[in-house]
Amino acid sequence: MMTALQDLKNFDPANAQVNLWTVKGPSGQAAQSPTYSGHWVETTPGVDQALKEAFAADSARIEEVLDYSLLAQNNEASALHIQADETHSGTLIAEIAAEVASKKARTVKHLQNSKFYVAKFIAGDQIVYGVRKTDTGWRTKKAASVRNLYFADEQLALDERPHFELSRTFDFFILGDDILILDKGHFETVLRHKAEQREDFAALRAEPEFLAVFVSIDPLVAYIGDNKIQLRRACAIHSKGHYRDPIFMEQLRNNQAEYGFTIEFDDQGRIVATPETCAQIMKALLDHRLKSGFSSLIYDVQDTTPVNV
């Protein structure tokens, strides 16, 4: 992880060539690799310089790197790390591999409704990709609903040229086998991680071992819905698999009251899910309510990392 950060900091964007791509997608069936459609755009030295400054600013502010997980969150001074081969980044990179004539943006329609853009920073045999999700200003609907103005010589005037906004930050960087993530939500949208979470949740709902610990999972399914945070939590429950551990489930039944839970169980020891207790059930199966060994206070945590002692 730290090697990836060091590689990012060692890369000198000021002396790199910059190629800008606008990309539409991801599209295609959720169970398949996503499809992207990209066009490269000729840019002025001013645009290139702005992209380089965004790269340098993002690189400078990252002080630590955390492992990407479904529930992990970073802050303004940290990034999440994931191996590129765990994502669909290879499909994206293949789409924007070469600035050939057939892929050049020649009309405004090639840019409008792009879901994100990618700045390719090239220095010798090194390439770093800076990816940023576009805002609503890139949408045809937004462009049709407003008139652009500019202020000069103490007056406002109309500017009828198509307008697109360039962010001062990137959402994530792809460098070799590594991805450093600054905006987790945008990363998951661009590389369609949420679609994979939906698939994983469907697999969880069909798993006999999971079904066996409930009288009915219907209230839990309704509670999770398509909410991205709850989907992440459900996938983390699937990954941790505490529900498969009879000892864990017995401890949950015997000790839940001590931890402030009011989860109901039937005579066979199965969880009786209700709308009122679904949040508790999720927290319990994630093992996210813990007691301090120092203060004996009980805390809710966002994620857990086992410590070897």
Image (cartoon, grey):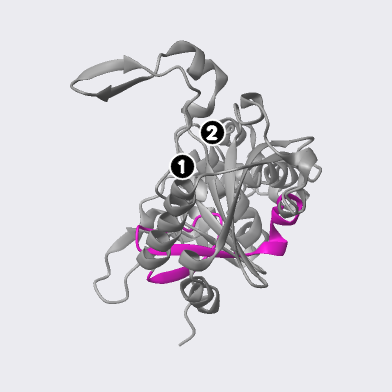
Q: Is residue 15 above or below residue 129?
A: below
Q: Is residue 205 above or below residue 10?
A: above
Q: Residue furthest front?
A: 153
Label 2: few (<14), some (14–19) or many (≥20) C-alpha neighbours in 10 Å: some
Q: Residue furthest bottom?
A: 309
Q: Position of residue 300 (x, y in %)?
A: 36, 56
Label 1: few (<14), some (14–19) or many (≥20) C-alpha neighbours in 10 Å: some
Tell me if residue 84 is in the magenta stretch.
yes
Cα–Cα gap, marks 2 and 1: 8 Å
Task: Identify the residue shown where x is 41% and y is 71%.
Answer: 64
Q: Is residue 99 above or below residue 276?
A: below
Q: Secondary structure at mark 1?
A: helix
Does any portion of residue 304 appear in the rendered image? no
Decide which of 122, 209 is in the foreground and name it. 122
Does any portion of residue 195 appear in the rendered image? yes
Disc 1: which residue: 279
Decide which of 132, 186 is in the foreground and name it. 132
Please indicate whether residue 73 sits to the left or right of residue 220 in the image. left
Task: Identify the residue shown where x is 56% and y is 36%.
Answer: 224
Disc 2: which residue: 223
Q: Which residues are magenta?
A: 63-92
Tell me if residue 287 is in the magenta stretch.
no
Please indicate whether residue 201 sits to the left or right of residue 266 in the image. right
